[in-house]
Image (cartoon, rainbow, N blue to C red):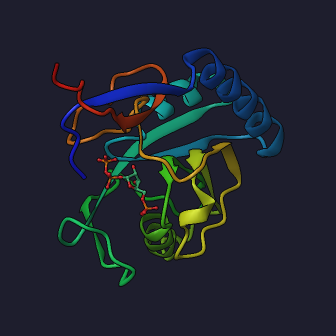
Amino acid sequence: MTHSNPSLRVLLSAEQIQARIRELGAQIDRDYPDGQVYLVAILKGACFFLADLARAIQRQTRIDFIGISSYGKGKTTSGEVKLTKDLDSSIEGADVLVVEDIVDTGITLNYLMHVLRQRRPRSLRIAALLDKPSRRVRPVDVAYVGFQIPDQFVVGFGLDYAENYRNLSDVCVLEETAAAPKP
Ligand code: PRP
């Protein structure tokens, strides 16, 4: 995908995103039993969502990070992914909530849930800010979804294009605008 002259169109404003994260935090507080929620964010994009979601949850939380990368550049339906950074501690017996910025093909989370389930957490759920259900090739059960979005290339709020745009407070569609016609 090349963007010779990209422009950004706001899909979800910072206000919409923050309001929805507050709702998700309240829902998580209601759903979980007493005790600690062990938040596991997937590097790198989910860091922004994690920071806001953790502050929207009133009960005790613990945070940790896990790194995952696909083999090669383009993700394929072969689902070949690998861990690049593991958690710092055991999740056995913990109420684990995996925090992700976007579920696209589902390959990343399908793999990660398989890995984490083997570590015997007490519960294991997913919170994803964005969900593109039309792109799914692997099943993923997402307990908490911020927004379902159409199949458009989005950046911002952690999502990047060639590592740029992660720090935008809005989620934007990256569009290629036609170059201005020569006079
Ligand atoms: C993105 C996103 C998810 C994954 C979703 O990560 O943050 O982890 O892709 O795609 P999938 O459902 O098709 O597996 P990316 O590999 O771009 O890494 P990043 O978070 O470091 O940008």
Residue situated in front as seen by the camera: 43 or 62: 43
Residue 75, x across and y down, in percent: 31, 70
Residue 163, x across and y down, in percent: 21, 38
Residue 67, located in which quarter of the rendered image?
A: bottom left
The image shows residue 56, relative to residue 128, as above or below, that is: above
Residue 88, x across and y down, in percent: 32, 50
The image shows residue 66, relative to residue 120, as above or below, that is: above
On screen, residue 111 versus residue 166, left or right, reads right
Residue situated in front as seen by the camera: 88 or 12: 12
Residue 165 seen anywhere in this rendered image of the structure? no
Counting the numbered discs, the total is 0
Residue situated in front as seen by the camera: 49 or 1: 1
The image shows residue 112, relative to residue 21, as above or below, that is: below
Residue 159, located in which quarter of the rendered image?
A: top left
Residue 6 seen anywhere in this rendered image of the structure? yes
Residue situated in front as seen by the camera: 50 or 183: 183
Q: Residue at x 60, y 68 (%)?
A: 140
Q: Residue at x 44, y 70 (%)?
A: 107
On screen, residue 125 versus residue 118, left or right, reads right
Q: Residue at x 34, y 27 (%)?
A: 7
Q: Quadrant of ligand 1?
A: bottom left
Q: Quadrant of the C terminus?
A: top left
Q: Seen from this angle, which residue lies furthest right?
A: 30
Q: Residue at x 40, y 30 (%)?
A: 156
Residue 133, x across and y down, in percent: 62, 61
